[in-house]
Image: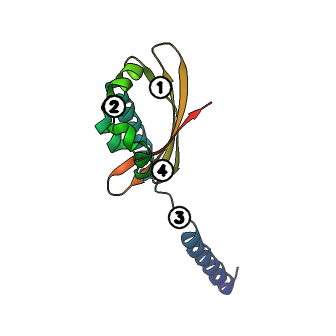
Amino acid sequence: MSLKQKKINISSLLVALFLSLVFFKPVDLFAVGSVDTEAEQVITQYFNALINGDTATIRGLLGTRLLKQRSRLLSNPVYGDKLRELYGNANFEVLSKKVVSSAAAVVVVEVIYNTNDKATFKFLLMEESPSGMKIFREDEVL
């Protein structure tokens, strides 16, 4: 390979590297691990708050849009008692976690209620600056 061909190959490589940095966001592998851990911690806090009827903690774990949707419910003075009644002896198990970006994760949780009825929920968690990881969406999986 001639010196001119080597220069062309190196130039092509540098152009390809530059374009990949411009068009593709690099994923920080350390951040992915922390997103996974933080998402599971938020879900654990959320379900502990449900068990205890702790509406203040629930408020702190919800993203802005979801909090607006549930604000009236969370302000109801009897809602905490209803949560304790429903979730008091329930068991929760994280079925899966998937990191979808360096600032977002999807967590699937199975709930087994006092009556042995089961429900599965899918949560989307995202970083909400400056307050950290929040629950942005909660859907029951049928």
The residue lying at 36 percent from left, 42 percent from top is: 61
For marks 2 and 3, give the one nearer the viewer: 2
For marks 2 and 1, give the one nearer the viewer: 2
Q: Which mark identifies residue 104?
A: 4
CB atoms at circles 2 and 1 under 8 Å apart? Answer: no
Mark 1 to mark 3 CA distance (whole Å): 33 Å
- Residue picked out by circle 2: 49
CB atoms at circles 1 and 3 under 8 Å apart? Answer: no
Above or below for 91 versus 42: above
Pointer 4 or 1: first along the chain: 1
> Going by the picture, which residue comes out furthest to the bottom?
4
- Residue type, label 1: Glu
Q: Position of residue 51 (x, y in %)?
A: 36, 25
The C terminus lies in quadrant: top right
- Residue type, label 2: Ala
Quadrant of the rendered image containing residue 24 = bottom right
Mark 4 to mark 1 CA distance (whole Å): 20 Å
> Going by the picture, which residue comes out furthest to the top?
115
- Residue type, label 4: Ala
- Residue picked out by circle 1: 93
Considering the numbered disc 4 on the image, is that residue within a helix, a strand or a loop? strand
Pointer 2 or 3: first along the chain: 3
The residue lying at 51 percent from left, 62 percent from top is: 26
- Residue picked out by circle 3: 25
For marks 1 and 3, give the one nearer the viewer: 1
Q: Residues within 10 Å of mark 2 (few under 14, many from 20)?
A: many
Pointer 1 or 3: first along the chain: 3
Q: Position of residue 102 (x, y in %)?
A: 47, 54
The residue lying at 37 percent from left, 24 percent from top is: 82
